[in-house]
Amino acid sequence: MANGYLYMEDDGTVIHITQEAPITHQFEIEIYEGIVCPGFVNTHCHLELSHMKGMMPEGSGLPAFVDQIPKQRQKSTLDLAQSMKQSDQEMCEAGIVAVGDISNTETTIQIKSESSIRYHSFVELFGLNKNEALHLLAEGKKTLKKFKTADLAASLVPHAPYSVSPDLLKGIYAYCEGSLLSIHHQETPSENELFLQGQGDLAETFLKKDLDLSAHLNFGKNATEFSLIPYLSRHQKILLVHNTYSSASDIDRVINHFTDAYWCTCPKANWYIERRLPDYNLWRKKGLKITLGTDSLASNDSLNILEELKLIQNKFPNIPTAELLSWACKNGADYFGFHTLGTFKTGNKPGVVLIEKVDGLQLTPESKVRVLAH
């Protein structure tokens, strides 16, 4: 609403929101110019890659990116713990109040335990060798237990359709039993080529590692048909991440099966790696529940949701800012079940962000975040 009043307790709890000015002097009034919104929810991040900023070449495409990450990850000269702590602080200062973080190890536990950000950790597994599935699953369960012992929300998830054997997928899904799921999904054209023909850049990348893909993948089905629909109930809550190359028919397969699917976009990372963004107009036409992520500093120069919104609005100026903010706030909170975040509903404590240097209700290249309450 224009010229609105947000009434809050000193601790950040929302009393109510209205366009009517207070009629008594019992409230202290602070006046701001710009757009006021709840704190942002970053549904996809990789804190563990925070020491890799600027190390990966831009525009290399996902297969080359995936191939280089493990090698470059070990070459960074930056201190990992300090880099992760800085990333957590950067997100706080950027108005982010909740994060879905991909975790391959337990290294982020202390930072998350001490952070003012509310985290859900996705303990991510990958491995195409079906003979290693039981071992990988056991190690993943151990890591998951460490997060839960630290009283941190967490769930076991697969990395991507192309990087997990059917045996490992079955093990993950059987163990999760309805907990939150996240999976990297259709972020490169070679993903569909891999599943449909057993060819393409991803297939070549794996063959160079002497992996016999025909022994682990069932060719002839696309990523969704291979990794999701055969295993999961219609009511499984799932976050599909990236979806840069999801066609209308791909989307229909998902929404015809799942009743509670969310679609996460990480625009700056997609642009960094593939020089491409999803077709957001198609997503909107299909009525998808869209969320925002930053991905990692290996594929981004910041962990800032406002910067993601600015890129989308620059490329898709027809999308209203209010709608973009619902992606960045409410939808992510809904996915995680963080019911006190995402909206200015009475009783919520969602954080308060002021977006300054706007043009009416449009973002500008100079728009920036000022955190009023975290």
Image: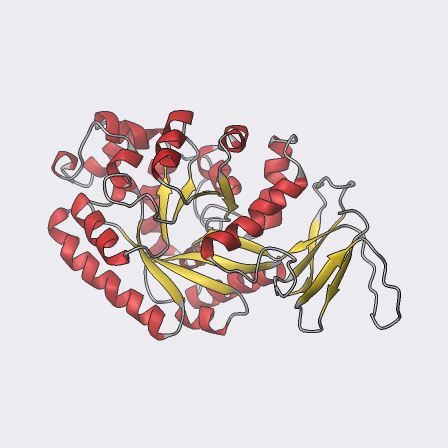
Taking the spot 67% from the left edge, 60% from the top edge, the residue there is: 352
Above-or-below relation of 326 to 9: above
> In the picture, residue 128 is in which quadrant?
top left
Whether residue 123 sits left or right of residue 195 in the image: it is right
Whether residue 99 sits left or right of residue 240 in the image: it is right
**Colour scheme of this structure image?**
secondary structure
Whether residue 308 sits left or right of residue 177 in the image: it is right
Asked whether 26 or 112 is in front, the reply is 26
Task: Tell me residue 300's x, y (percent).
Answer: 51, 47
Taking the spot 56% from the left edge, 64% from the top edge, the residue there is: 89
Is residue 186 visible in the rendered image? The answer is: no
Quadrant where the image shows the C terminus: bottom right
Task: Tell me residue 259's x, y (percent).
Answer: 39, 42
How many numbered marks, from 0 up?
A: 0
Task: Tell me residue 296's x, y (percent).
Answer: 46, 51
Taking the spot 43% from the left edge, 55% from the top edge, the residue there is: 46
Asked whether 245 or 7 is in front, the reply is 7
Taking the spot 17% from the left edge, 33% from the top edge, the residue there is: 218
Task: Tell me residue 319's x, y (percent).
Answer: 63, 34
Is residue 234 visible in the rendered image? The answer is: yes
Above-or-below relation of 146 to 19: below
> In the picture, residue 372 is in which quadrant?
bottom right
Above-or-below relation of 335 to 64: below
